[in-house]
Amino acid sequence: MPQAGSKKCLKTSEAEEEDLTSGLLHCAHLVLPWLTSLELASISLSCKFLNATSKSITLRRILDASRSIENIPIPFHPSINDCPYAFFIYTPTSIIPDHRIERQCWGSISDSQSSHVGSESMSLVDDLGGDVSGCDCENCGEYEFQCPCSSLDGLEDVATECGPRCSCGLECENRLTQRGICVRLKISRDEKKGWGLYADELIKKGTFICELLTTGESRRRQKIYDARAKGGRFTSSLLVVREHLPSGNACLRTNIDATWIGNVGRFVNHSCDGGNLVTRLVRSTGVMLPRLCFYASRSISKDEELTFSYGDIRVNPEGLKCFCGSSCCLGTLPSENT
Ligand SMILES: C[S@@+](CC[C@H](N)C(=O)[O-])C[C@H]1O[C@@H](n2cnc3c(N)ncnc32)[C@H](O)[C@@H]1O
């Protein structure tokens, strides 16, 4: 009898242990995807039990930088062993500086499926806070697919797309950049330039690639980034876009900082020859914040790196070394007094 009793006792404790283990694993699957790459790596090193879970999270992160937010996964192709992926917070829309996102779930079995499409960070409302509909173009809505407020001919610097004030839907031809990334891209690491964005299929001239996101207080940030970049292994992604007003003596300035929070546009490196992308500032009718969009300036082959010119001005002769490899390389990356 006592023997039978102790066996039963052993069975119960084994079952309890199994329950506990599966409970802990379940918690790990819920919590670990919220960790940064460094936190995840240290968990993986210090706890054998969580090693497999953290490895599977790392694998899922490598397979899609966009956390299933974009239409197509954008994988990392790691070439340097200790750096399997770049850690940052992914956003499909611009974020204004006060809006803080501290953490984002990335690499869980069911990553966020929230849609990119049609999301805007600012829109026009009436005095009571209701959405204002109907765009400035009086005929909007009379055309089934194309609103006449379109200005998408050629690749001019500034374009206007339909927005929340237009009565047309997302299928409107003049909402090209609002449907998210529709070409196959991948992210790969170069020893000198860091991460870069590459074509993963043939891309035709004029194709919309992606936009560069988020705005910020650039002067303060630029100083911090410059200091950190000198220490090595740090790359910032800060751009200042100026639109000259007709008067000629003033300009509208948009700061875009994708260093910590952004989308794949943050991986586009500089080339002194202008690269294969052009940027265009896109305004949507009824949306205050313009969006900086990248388009293919020529046909781009599969595996080619996507690059553009960060600018022509170099105020800092001691600036970061340029490794674009073009025959007209000026030796340093463009720098401006922001
Ligand atoms: C927009 S980020 C591009 C992505 C970046 N390579 C990364 O690893 O996150 C800009 C930074 O990339 C690096 N970079 C871009 N183009 C470069 C080039 N032609 N030569 C050297 N470094 C470059 C610089 O550190 C720059 O501050």
Image (cartoon, rainbow, N blue to C red):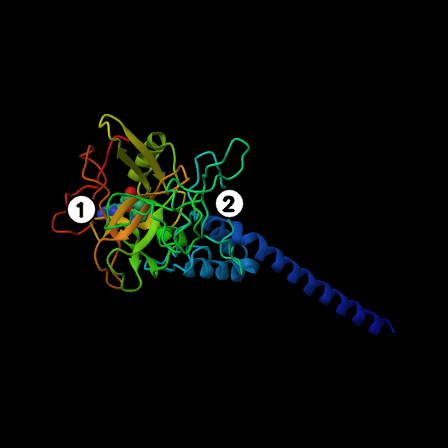
Question: In the rendered view, does 253 fall on the left or right side of 53?
Answer: left
Name the residue rendered at 33%, 42% in the picture.
237
Location of residue 57 in the rendering, given as x and y in whole percent from the top left corner: 49, 58
| In the foreground, 3 or 241 | 241
- Taking the view exactly as shown, the residue that stands out farthest to the top is 249
Q: Secondary structure at mark 2?
A: loop
Mark 1 C-beta closer than 8 Å to ligand 1: yes
Q: Categorize mark 2 by other alpha carbons within 10 Å: few (<14), some (14-19), many (20+).
A: few
Location of residue 189 in the rendering, given as x and y in whole percent from the top left corner: 31, 55
Q: Categorize mark 1 by other alpha carbons within 10 Å: few (<14), some (14-19), many (20+).
A: many
Which image quarter: residue 81? bottom left
Name the residue rendered at 28%, 45% in the picture.
280
| In the foreground, 125 or 93 | 125
Location of residue 257 in the rendering, given as x and y in whole percent from the top left corner: 36, 39
- Provide the residue designation for mark 1: 272
| In the foreground, 238 or 160 | 160
Which image quarter: residue 219? top left
- Provide the residue designation for mark 2: 103
Residue 171 vertical position relative to residue 313 in the rendered view, above or below: below
Residue 247 vertical position relative to residue 181 in the rendered view, above or below: above
